[in-house]
Amino acid sequence: MIRNRLAKAAALSGAAVVVALGIAGPAFAHVTVNPNSATQGGYGRVAFRVPTESDTASTTKLEVNLPEDAPVASVSTMPVPGWTVAVENRKLSTPLNVHGSEVTEVVAKITWTATAGAEIKPGQFQEFPVSMGPLPDKDQMIFKTLQTYSDGEIVRWIDEPVEGGDEPENPAPVLKLAKAADAAAPTAGPTVAAAAVDSDSSSSSSGASVGLGIAGLVAGVLGLVLGGLAFMRTRKAS
C-alpha cells in the first residue's frame, strides 16, 4: 500500500516537472551571442547561437544587424558548412581612427542563408561565428536579429533590454563590454587563490601517499615477524 502511494506521488511529481519545463523552455530558446561579454578596445570571437523553436518548420535564414551607435572597423565571418553568407556595408559620417588609419566604411548587416538540407531543424541549433574589433568604448552592443523559417514565418529578435525590467518577449542578442582594467581586475585574486589551493592539495596528497607507504611497510614487517614466530612454535610442538 505504502509503495503504491509512493509510486503515485513520484509520478505526479515527474509530471509536474515536465509541465514546468515545457512552460519555461521556450523563454530561453531565443537567439543569443556567445560568449555574452568582451573587453572594450580588444578583438573578440563571438558566435550567434540560433535554436529552432518551431515543431514543424526549420530555420533557413539569419540576419544580424550590427548596431549603428557602436561601429566596428574589422568584422570577419567563419564559414558555416551548408550556409552562404552575405555582408552589407555602410558609410560612416564620422570615420574611425584605427591604428593610425581612418576607416570610413563598416559592416552593417550579415546574412546567412541555408542551402538545401542544411536548415536548422526542429530541436536543433546552429552557431555562426564572427570575429570583430577593436570593440567600441560602449557598455554593450545590441544586435537586432531576424530569424526566418521554412514556412515563411519571421521572428524578430529586436527588443532592447530595459535596465531593472523583465526580459522582453523577443530580446535582441546583447554583448556586454567591460573596460580593460575592469575585465582584468577580478581574475587576479581568484587565480592566485586557486594556485594556493592546488599547491596545498598537492602537498596534502603527497604527505598522505608517503604516510600510507610507511604504514604498508610497517604492516609487512609485522607480518613477517608474526609468521616467523608461528613457524618456530610449530617446530617446537613437533
Image (spheres, rainbow, N blue to C red):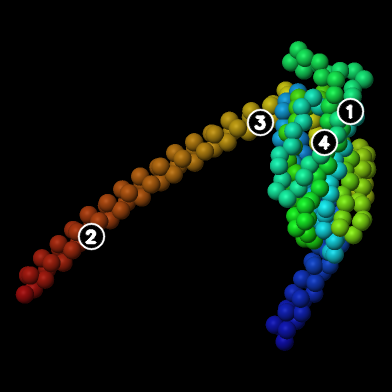
- Determine contact: label 4, label 1, CB under 8 Å: no
- Label 1 – label 3 distance at C-alpha: 38 Å
Residue at 49% in and 36% down = 199
Residue at which label 3 appears: 187
Which residue is farthest bottom? 1
Q: Earlier in the sequence, mark 2 or mark 1?
A: 1
Q: Secondary structure at mark 4?
A: strand
Towards the viewer: 190 or 22: 22
Task: State which tag comes first along the sequence, 1 or 3.
Answer: 1
Query: Mark 3 or 2 closer to N-term?
Result: 3
Q: Amino acid at mark 1?
A: Arg
Residue holding disc 1: 90
| Residue labelled with disc 2 | 223
The residue lying at 18 percent from left, 58 percent from top is: 225
Type of amino acid under label 4: Val
Q: With respect to residue 237, does 36 lie above or below? A: above
Percent position of residue 110, x then y: 83, 38
Disc 3 versus disc 2: nearer the observer: 3
Q: Is residue 138 left or right of residue 35?
A: right
Quarter of the image with the N terminus in it: bottom right
Do the CB atoms of the residues marked 4 and 3 lie less than 8 Å apart?
no
Question: Circle 4 is placed at which residue position?
Answer: 87
